[in-house]
Image: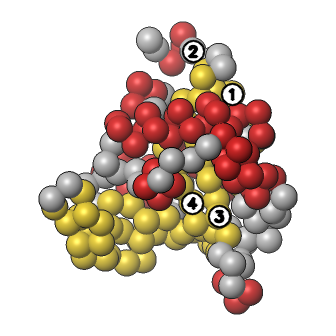
Amino acid sequence: MTKEEIEIRIKEADKSDAKELLIFIQKMSEQSSFVIFPSLDEEITVEQEVRFIEQFLHSKNDLLLISLSQNDIIGLVTIRAQDREEMKHVGELGIVVDQEYWGFGLGSALVEEAIHWSSNESDLVRLEVEVQEPNKRALHLYEKAGFEQEGHLKKRVKVKTDYVDTIMMALIVK
């Protein structure tokens, strides 16, 4: 499979995507230890996922985009705004792409869409992302998009039996 052989589209997730999103998230959690999905600690129903998607749809500062090849979800990007009044201008960025599609530019496209939305459609001023230090692909992706490293957190994430450092990165969008 090459870039030229696939057609990819990016869209805002809606309630009808709930079941496929759950399947995708489970698959991604098995592919890589770089992505942590807190919801996988307990079983999530389709109805719960629908409510989760609705939260994004009804929020000015939260975003959930999915990328599709044919009708299969192959990537997603989220932005979740902080809840506290004095921090509502800060959005936390999360991105995951199916390994079969690494190297196709999909990560860059999702990050670009998220930055464009943050700059033009939201009240967000700052995007933040926390990246596991061994994830050099992600560090490069965010640096290429203009994110700057702001901190280094030692032994922040436990992966199997090891502790991994994370890098805090941010981008001012307004």
**Outermost residue, bottom direction?**
86
Secondary structure of the residue carrying numbered label 2:
loop
Q: CA distance from mark 2 to mark 4?
A: 26 Å
Callout 2, which amino acid? Ile
Q: Check disc 1 and give the amino acid type.
A: Arg
Which image quarter is the C terminus in? bottom right
Which of the colour schemes (rainbow, by chain, secondary structure, one colour) is used?
secondary structure
Residue 6 has which mark?
2
Sooner in the amino-acid sequence: mark 4 or mark 3:
3
Q: Residues within 10 Å of mark 4 (few under 14, many from 20)?
A: many
Q: CA separation, marks 4 and 3? A: 7 Å
Is residue 120 visible in the rendered image? The answer is no
Helix, strand or loop at mark 4: strand
Badge 3 marks a residue whose secondary structure is strand
Alpha carbon of mark 3 to alpha carbon of mark 1: how far?
22 Å
**Residue at the spot of label 4:** 93
Residue 69 spot, x, y in % from top left? 61, 21
